[in-house]
Amino acid sequence: MHRWLLSGLTCAAAVLLYAPYTYVHAQELPVRPGLIAAQLDSNKAVYHVGEPIMLRLTLINRTSQKIDFAHGAPYYMSDLEVVDTEGKVVSATIGRGPCWCQGTISSVRLDRGRPVVVEYNDPRITEREGLGYAVGALRAWADIKDWGYVLQQPGTYTIVASLSKVAAIIPGGPEFSTSPSDKSNAVHLTIIR
């Protein structure tokens, strides 16, 4: 009970600190495509069946102005499009991974041309340590299962990320949300037995 109360108070404090991004949902903001680019990476090109497939999301400011964006876990900031060897779309089969608000409510500045890796507070580490939050437990790599995908069949897969209407603002300017039509590079990986 005490831990949940502490966690709730931490969430409330985070909401007050980052109010511009919590009172307005990204869905309510005008969509502005092409301002923020996404780059997707896998930690290797070949995996064995059952091995965790780890992905990393990086954001790049395409404009000449600074952009602040509401930062969260990569699997909540982006959607994946997965295609198998035969060109068939693979659907997500499980729910998205866990995410506590301590790891989702923050603001990050994107300077022009400086890539920013999306890091998040891994709630599994937090839970194991018994803390409301875990300082220094930030992770950049997330399992594809956190996006809801379980790839168990051998073959070659192509994966593309699109930003999931991330709330952003040009300081002193308008708030906007990213466009899901902006796609990342394609990541190609192979799963073997």
Image: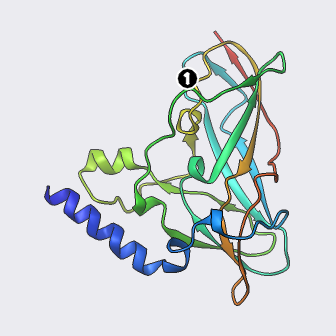
Residue 130: x and y in percent read 23, 51
If the image is split into quadrants, where does the C terminus sit?
top right
Check the image and name the residue furthest to the top.
Answer: 193
Q: Is residue 171 above or below residue 109?
A: below
Of residues 82 and 115, the one drawn nearer to the viewer in this rendering: 82
Residue 150: x and y in percent read 58, 24
How many C-alpha atoms fall within 10 Å of the one at disc 1: few (<14), some, or many (≥20)? few
Q: Residue at x 48, y 77 (%)?
A: 18
Residue 118: x and y in percent read 61, 57
Q: Is residue 50 left or right of residue 38?
A: left
Label 1 is placed on what type of residue? Glu
Residue 37: x and y in percent read 79, 59
Of residues 157 and 17, the one drawn nearer to the viewer in this rendering: 17
Q: Residue at x 54, y 59 (%)?
A: 72
Check the image and name the residue furthest to the front.
Answer: 28
Q: Quadrant of residue 32?
A: bottom right
Q: Is residue 59 left or right of residue 16?
A: right
Of residues 41 and 68, the one drawn nearer to the viewer in this rendering: 68
Which residue position holds label 1? 51
Q: Quadrant of residue 30?
A: bottom right
Q: Is residue 129 left or right of residue 98?
A: left
Q: Is residue 109 above or below residue 48?
A: below
If the image is split into quadrants, where does the N terminus sit?
bottom left
Q: Is residue 151 above or below residue 75?
A: above
